[in-house]
Amino acid sequence: MFVAGFGFVFFPIDLHDRNQARALQPHGEWVTAQEVQVRIDYVSGKGGGYSEVDGVRVRLDGTRDQVDLENVNAESDSIYEDIRNGWQDPTSVTGYEPPLTVRVQRSDDGAIVSAMAKDDYDYWTGDNNDPEIGLTLGIGGLTALGVLLILNGVRLSWQIRRGRVRRAQHEAGHRERVATTGKRSRS
């Protein structure tokens, strides 16, 4: 059941990320960002915790505002070094160091609609099968659960035909009467 839930939770997330990257293929252009900041967040767990890059924003040439990148941290590892949380300049540990190559999609008036770092773009547009793995885990988990339920039903019907379940139910009912009334029935 856990495997099915895990697969079905990550399937739409991974599919969305891949579709965003693929939307940049026909309509995007490559630009270079010299100003980059990364947001580091700490993730706690039972066995300790780790930090990860949870956001990246860049200032592109010719733009006044910073642009948040989509689907960051696609292939980077968790950071176990001592690092502060929040927005900061990127390092070799966090990745995304300038000059950073970015794929951007612009609207008709030149505004940036979507932007993604090259490494993340390459990860999601390459031979990535993360969504399919999630879907396979979900369907496989549900299939295994269905098979186990069918086998349990067959086992119970076999025990009912042999009379084992009725006898066990009768003994359980008899024990309950003795426990609640303190008297044994004569049956």
Image: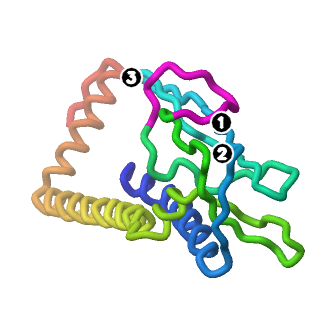
Q: Secondary structure at mark 2?
A: strand
Structural crowding at the residue carrying mark 2, measured as other residues with C-alpha within 10 Å and reported as few (<14), some (14–19) or many (≥20): many
Label 1: few (<14), some (14–19) or many (≥20) C-alpha neighbours in 10 Å: some
In the rendered structure, which disc, 1 or 3, sits on the residue that comes first in sequence? Answer: 1
Q: State the residue in front, 64 or 43.
A: 64
Secondary structure beneath dot 3 equals: loop
Residue 1 location (% of width, % of height): 37, 52
Does residue 9 show up magenta in the picture? no
Q: Are the residues at dot 3 and dot 2 in contact (C-beta closer than 8 Å)?
A: no
The residue that label 3 is drawn on is: 47
The stretch in magenta equals 78-91
- The answer to whether mark 1 and mark 2 are in CB contact below 8 A is yes
For this view, does 145 lie left or right of residue 166?
Answer: right
Q: CA distance from mark 1 to mark 2?
A: 6 Å
Which percent across, then down, holds residue 157?
20, 63
- Cα–Cα span, label 1 and label 3: 23 Å
Q: Tell me: residue 175, above or below residue 125.
A: above
- In the rendered image, the residue lying farthest to the left is 162
Of badges 3 and 2, the one in the foreground is 2
Q: Position of residue 163 (x, y in %)?
A: 13, 55
Report the magenta stretch's main SS.
loop
Q: Nearer the viewer, residue 87 or 59?
A: 59
State the residue position of label 1.
39
For marks 1 and 2, the one nearer the N-term is: 1
Residue at image position (46%, 31%) is 79
Identify the mark at residue 56; answer none if there is no mark: 2
Residue type at tag 3 = Gly
Q: Residue at x 65, y 57 (%)?
A: 32
Q: Which residue lies at the image location 68% right of the left edge and 61% below the top edge?
A: 115
Q: Amino acid at mark 1?
A: Arg
Cα separation, mark 3 vs mark 2, equals 27 Å
